[in-house]
Image (cartoon, helix red, strand yellow):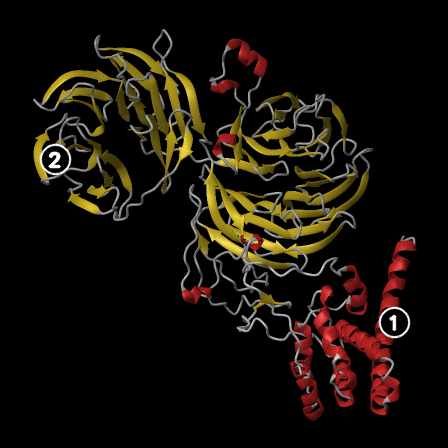
């Protein structure tokens, strides 16, 4: 997390956690066999991270090493025993030792003469690598002796792929022209040539399970299959990926082909049919085009629904990738497509989803998702449980115009009804179970302009709609009658309702945000500060924060109770969508030209966060998007750990004000039962006297008390020593007694009060009992105790302790107190203090009780 000049982190509330839905990019994958586990593993590149999957289940396994040293972008990787070879775009080749992560060798090539475009370690060629160039020539190097062994002149066309053939000394060379050259590098002879018509060869692989088949990838996503014995083209796998085939690998001695591409997909194909064409066996796939809409689904905060420009609707799990699922493409006529087998035909697919609303209340009974499509009047329904497009396309029957489109949707909290707003200003209600039209708001249209937002409250009583003409309208959901209409300062861009609190957020075209209370139908907050169109908004689960994402590349958090901006941070790519988990632990975002969903953890859940308003001239810092690996805790320096001026933790004083009555922090067990000690002792009296242990105790004995202290071992050498207790020991004065005597001299009693606070109920009783002259005390010390109580009442601190100690003192010494004039005078003074404090408190209690009784019984209009 970056820090700005003021020392504050770029975002005080959100820290980058990890990215979801990313599986592959344009870097070729690598397949390796683990002899110990007897399994194949495939590694793909995603941003700055590598993902390693077990091919058997395509489940994710761990990543371990990091190698730092390249200054340019890396575009080629080659495993090499205990080493790995990497090549960057400046044609600098570095060999790394895997386990020590140290650099073994570095080679630099002149890009104008030999720009490396492909790398291969020929089988059985010890310590040797073959390099292909964009200029067309190839070089064979010995990396141990750092020598160039041989230069192949090539075919005057750039080399795009190199692959070892099943035969020793034979290598397949893919060229920019679409040719595949099968070449013997030992004798520098060409054995055979193939050509495909789909552009340059992107990758090559050979089957090794007894079938002499070669596969070659193309930039348009097709795979060509050649028979090496008959030297002819035998089959093609069209649209294996929607983008260029980045890498393809046949598993050793298995009829399985692993492919990956920049369409964010990793696929495993099996060749078990009679025609020799591969069928899809298993896959890991995200969106292949930028996202259009994301929203959390359900109340557990574990699934995020996302729609994309690739036309699919998918669900990504925040827990584990195995729970991800795709709801597929929207099809114009599902039954007809199934009957005629046209699933892969682009013409039958619906345009991308632009907006959707989902509710899980009745997901097991009927469709629970409704979606608008780009340029379409019809809204499709989807079924989350069955992971497919639903049964209905909802649109008004009488509308035939092509230029009218659905612009806003909402689904009721019960899952029974869908509300759809159109660009013509019409707002309709449909039944989700039957797909039937159930009414329209307004006689013909709800708004004169295009509908920009629709929302239904949590109890299906109120429907709120807003249109581009700048009107916000409140309708009765049941009878469709207009209740209230209000003008907005600017045309609205989008609308969001927090159902639990009845708070409505409106993003306007002037880049400001209005917040309304739907009960009073009044604007309660106005926020401004964004410098671009507001793309999306999200409420925190408790309704305290409103989070807005804008084209100015910023994400801002507004505190609704205080009406202030409390957090702001910038991103290098504009955020298109923002949604917050129902459990409040994560914020999820999607961005322009990005295929993933990015999770940000809510810092306020696990650490103290300052929610102070940001100054008007605050300049937010740019934060990097999180990667697919969970971010590790960065060790902060000592300077960073020191609290800044902005983040000062509040330390409550012992007493807020001298006029306020303050209670102690002691538990009730220390003072509440002081008057009932004799009853408690009777109940707890042991039935039998304690027996002397025969052997040494297992535990070291401790002195009785609240604070445990070890007992000093008794030096008792004489077994016949007398058991008569020395009365001189009992006559010793306790610490508390001494402090009371000091109090008579200096009138300070804090130390005496602190000593009483440390004692338990029995200890307190013993101390107070010993104050009387009969038990070794004196009248002066008893007077000192009453002065201590007077001091506590005067300060109004430890109020309940003063009352409890005084009550016990009176109970123990009530018979002798009236006979001593000094004590009687002191008691009269303390009595007036107690009465004065209690009358004041009682009046406050009575006032509060009256107000509470009135609120409970009065009929509020």
Residue 159: image quadrant is top left
Other residues around mark 1 within 10 Å, as few (<14) / some (14–19) / many (≥20)? few
Which residue is denoted by mark 1 in the rendering? 843
Task: Pick out the residue farthest to the right.
Answer: 858
Where residue 543 appears, as percent x and y from the top left, is 67, 50
Q: Is residue 695 above or below residue 199?
A: below
Residue 223: image quadrant is top left
Q: Could you tell me how far apart the alpha carbons at marks 2 and 1 are, in whole angstroms? A: 96 Å
Residue displayed at 24% across by 12% down: 212
Disc assigned to residue 141: 2
Q: Is residue 569 above or below residue 77?
A: below
- Mark earlier in primary sequence (2, 1): 2
- Give the left or right position of residue 142, taking residue 314 as reference: left
Judge by depth and name the residue closer to the eye, 663 or 804.
804
Disc assigned to residue 369: none
Where residue 688 appears, as percent x and y from the top left, is 72, 58
- Give the left or right position of residue 424, taking residue 602 as reference: right
Where residue 323 appears, as percent x and y from the top left, is 52, 31
| Residue 807 visible, this orientation | yes
Q: Is residue 142 above or below residue 816?
A: above
Secondary element type, mark 1 = helix
């Amino acid at each position: 997390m970056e820090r700005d000049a003021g020392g504050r982190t770029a975002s005080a509330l959100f820290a980058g956690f990890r990215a979801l839905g990313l599986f592959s990019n344009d870097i070729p994958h690598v397949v390796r066999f683990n002899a110990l586990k007897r399994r194949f593993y495939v590694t793909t590149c995603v941003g700055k991270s590598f993902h390693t999957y077990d091919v058997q289940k395509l489940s994710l396994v761990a990543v371990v090493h990091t190698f730092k040293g390249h200054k340019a972008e890396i575009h080629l990787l080659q495993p090499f025993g205990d080493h790995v070879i990497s090549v960057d775009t400046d044609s600098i080749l570095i060999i790394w030792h895997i386990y020590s992560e140290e650099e073994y060798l570095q080679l630099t090539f002149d890009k104008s003469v030999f720009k490396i475009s492909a790398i291969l370690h020929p089988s059985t060629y010890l310590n040797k690598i073959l390099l292909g160039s964009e200029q067309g020539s190839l070089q064979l190097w010995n990396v141990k002796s750092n020598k160039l062994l041989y230069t192949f002149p090539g075919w005057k066309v750039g080399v795009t792929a190199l692959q070892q053939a099943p035969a020793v000394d034979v290598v397949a060379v893919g060229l920019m022209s679409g040719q595949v050259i099968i070449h013997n590098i030992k004798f520098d002879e060409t054995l055979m040539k193939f050509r495909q018509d789909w552009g340059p060869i992107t990758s090559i692989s050979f089957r090794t399970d007894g079938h002499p088949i070669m596969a070659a990838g193309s930039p348009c996503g097709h795979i060509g299959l050649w028979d090496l014995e008959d030297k002819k083209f035998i089959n093609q796998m069209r649209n294996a990926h929607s983008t260029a085939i980045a890498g393809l690998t046949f598993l050793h001695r298995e009829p399985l082909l692993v492919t990956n591409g920049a369409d964010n997909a990793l696929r495993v194909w099996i060749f078990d049919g009679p025609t020799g064409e591969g069928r899809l066996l298993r896959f890991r796939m995200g969106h292949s085009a930028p996202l259009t809409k994301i929203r959390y689904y359900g109340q557990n905060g574990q699934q995020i629904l996302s729609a994309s420009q690739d036309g699919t609707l998918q669900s990504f799990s925040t827990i584990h990738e195995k729970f991800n699922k795709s709801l597929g493409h929207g099809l114009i006529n599902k039954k007809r497509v199934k009957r005629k087998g046209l699933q892969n035909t682009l013409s039958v697919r619906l345009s991308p989803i632009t907006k959707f609303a989902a509710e899980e209340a009745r997901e097991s009974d009927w469709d629970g998702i409704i979606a608008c499509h780009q340029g379409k009047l019809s809204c499709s329904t989807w079924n989350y449980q069955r992971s497919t497009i639903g049964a209905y396309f909802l649109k008004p029957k009488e509308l035939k115009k092509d230029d009218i489109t659905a612009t806003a949707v909402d689904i009721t909290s019960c899952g029974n009804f869908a509300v759809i707003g159109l660009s013509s200003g019409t707002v309709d209600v449909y039944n989700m179970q039957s797909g039937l039209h159930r009414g329209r708001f307004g006689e013909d249209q709800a708004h004169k302009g295009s509908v920009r937002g629709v929302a239904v409250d949590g109890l299906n009583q109120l429907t709120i709609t807003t249109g581009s003409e700048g009107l916000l309208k409140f309708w009765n959901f049941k009878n469709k009658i207009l209740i209230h209409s209000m003008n907005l300062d600017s045309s609205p861009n989008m609308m969001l309702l927090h159902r639990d609190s009845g708070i409505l957020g409106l993003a306007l075209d002037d880049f400001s945000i209005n917040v309304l209370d739907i009960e009073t139908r009044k604007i309660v907050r106005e926020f401004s500060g964004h410098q671009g169109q507001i793309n999306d908004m999200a409420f925190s689960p408790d309704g305290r924060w409103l989070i807005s994402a804008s084209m100015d590349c910023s994400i801002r958090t507004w505190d609704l109770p205080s009406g202030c901006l409390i957090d702001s941070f910038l991103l290098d790519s504009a955020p298109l969508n923002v949604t917050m988990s129902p459990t409040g632990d994560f914020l999820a975002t999607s961005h322009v030209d990005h295929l993933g969903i990015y999770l940000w953890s809510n810092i306020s859940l696990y650490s103290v966060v300052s929610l102070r308003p940001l100054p008007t001239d605050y300049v937010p810092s740019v934060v990097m998007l999180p990667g697919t690996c969970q971010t590790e805790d960065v060790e902060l320096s000592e300077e960073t750990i020191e609290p800044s001026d902005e983040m000062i933790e509040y330390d409550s004083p012992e007493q807020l004000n001298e006029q306020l009555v303050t209670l102690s922090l002691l538990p009730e067990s220390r003072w509440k039962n002081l008057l009932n000690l004799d009853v408690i002792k009777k109940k707890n009296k042991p039935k039998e006297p304690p027996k002397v242990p025969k052997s040494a105790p297992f535990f070291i004995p401790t002195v009785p008390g609240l604070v445990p202290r070890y007992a000093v071992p008794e030096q008792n050498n004489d077994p016949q020593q007398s058991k008569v207790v020395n009365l001189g020991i009992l006559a010793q004065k306790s610490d508390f007694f001494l402090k009371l005597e000091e109090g008579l001299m200096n009138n300070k009693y804090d130390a005496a009060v602190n000593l009483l606070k440390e004692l338990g109920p029995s200890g307190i009783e013993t101390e107070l009992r010993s104050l009387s002259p009969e038990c070794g005390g004196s009248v002066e010390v008893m007077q000192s105790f009453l002065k201590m109580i007077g001091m506590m009442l005067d300060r109004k601190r430890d109020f309940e302790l003063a009352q409890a100690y005084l009550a016990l003192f009176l109970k123990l010494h009530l018979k002798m107190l009236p006979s001593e004039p000094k004590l009687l005078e002191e008691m009269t003074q303390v009595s007036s203090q107690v009465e004065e404090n209690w009358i004041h408190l009682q009046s406050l209690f009575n006032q509060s009780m009256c107000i509470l009784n009135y609120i409970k019984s009065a009929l509020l209009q």
